[in-house]
């Protein structure tokens, strides 16, 4: 078997999209796939999510799988080793949170909106928003993008605001190459995902002759 890095998004890829994000679980067939991949020599298996690392660890409990939370800012390696951002990134996070969070007040007041704070990002969930309020959500989010220069990624009935603009799943894939680069090259990557953040990683992988799998029909790469 060739050496490969397998990277999977969680929500909408390894788990079904559910109305209550706290109820998301690893699909049993996907869990079986992950376990089988880890049994083959030369395979690195990773789950990359915008969820916090602690959240992700509670949902993917396979010791041999690399976990990347915060779209690749925090890592849990096989053997229980944690890798995370440096002090400069922590200081920038504090500054950006103070700058951006107050601007979310208008969005949060819209009926049906739920704002989920993931520390390194904020997810604005609008699955329960109806009628003209959905247009209002889009308008307020685009105002934030224009006025605050935020990095904004859309998924199924959710918009993800990254506090550090350079943070996305492309960064996570590049980090995987750095972590395992002595054995693997970028053309050895297989990436599967379903939203705009995943699409950024997918384009990077395709440009380097890797393989991607688009789950569902929400994005085009």
Image (cartoon, rainbow, N blue to C red):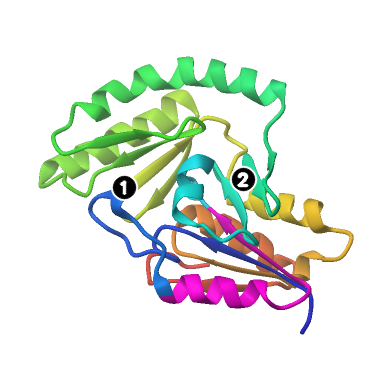
Q: Secondary structure at mark 2?
A: loop
Q: Residue furthest bottom?
A: 1
The magenta stretch is: 29-48
Q: Is residue 143 above or below residue 100?
A: below
The earlier-in-sequence mark between 1 and 2 is 1
For label 2, the crowd category at 10 Å Cα-Cα, with few meaning under 14, some 14 to 19 and many 20 or more, is: many
Tag 1 residue: 22
Query: Does residue 157 appear in the picture of this structure?
Result: no
In which quarter of the view is residue 146 placed?
top left
* Residue 51 horizontal side relative to residue 209, left or right: left
Do the CB atoms of the residues marked 1 and 2 lie less than 8 Å apart?
Answer: no
Give 86 or 125, whichever is nearer the viewer: 86
User: Picture coordinates of residue 137 (x, y %)?
Assistant: 24, 38
Q: Nearer the viewer, mark 1 or mark 2?
A: 1
Q: Which residue is located at x 31 percent, y 49 percent?
A: 21
Q: Residue furthest right?
A: 182
* Residue 23 horizontal side relative to residue 67, left or right: left
User: Picture coordinates of residue 142 (x, y %)?
Assistant: 36, 36
Q: Which residue is located at x 81 percent, y 57 percent?
A: 180
Q: Is residue 42 above or below residue 146?
A: below
Tag 2 residue: 72
For label 1, the crowd category at 10 Å Cα-Cα, with few meaning under 14, some 14 to 19 and many 20 or more, is: few
Real-space Cα distance between discs 1 and 2? 20 Å
Label total for image: 2
Q: Which residue is located at x 82 percent, y 66 percent?
A: 184
Query: Does residue 156 appear in the picture of this structure?
Result: yes
Residue 42 is inside the magenta segment: yes
Looking at the figure, which quarter contains the N terminus?
bottom right
User: Picture coordinates of residue 60 (x, y %)?
Assistant: 49, 57
């Amino acid at each position: 078997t060739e050496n490969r890095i397998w990277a999977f998004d969680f929500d909408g890829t390894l788990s079904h999209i559910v109305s209550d994000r706290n109820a998301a679980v690893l699909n049993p067939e996907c869990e079986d796939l992950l376990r089988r991949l880890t049994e083959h020599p030369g395979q690195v298996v990773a789950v990359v999510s915008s969820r916090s690392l602690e959240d992700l660890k509670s949902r993917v409990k396979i010791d041999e799988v690399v976990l990347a939370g915060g779209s690749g800012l925090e890592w849990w390696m096989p053997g229980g080793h944690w890798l995370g951002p440096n002090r400069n990134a922590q200081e920038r996070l504090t500054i950006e949170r103070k700058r951006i969070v107050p601007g979310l007040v208008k969005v949060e007041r819209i009926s049906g909106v739920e704002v989920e704070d993931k520390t390194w990002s904020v997810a604005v969930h609008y699955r329960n928003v109806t009628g003209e309020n959905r247009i209002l959500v889009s308008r307020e989010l685009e105002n934030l993008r224009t006025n605050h220069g935020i990095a904004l990624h859309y998924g199924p009935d959710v918009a993800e605001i990254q506090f550090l603009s350079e943070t996305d799943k492309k960064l996570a894939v590049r980090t995987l190459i750095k972590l395992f680069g002595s054995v693997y090259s970028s053309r050895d990557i297989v990436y599967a995902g379903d939203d705009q953040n995943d699409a950024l990683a997918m384009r990077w992988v395709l440009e380097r002759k890797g393989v991607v799998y688009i789950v569902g029909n929400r994005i085009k790469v």
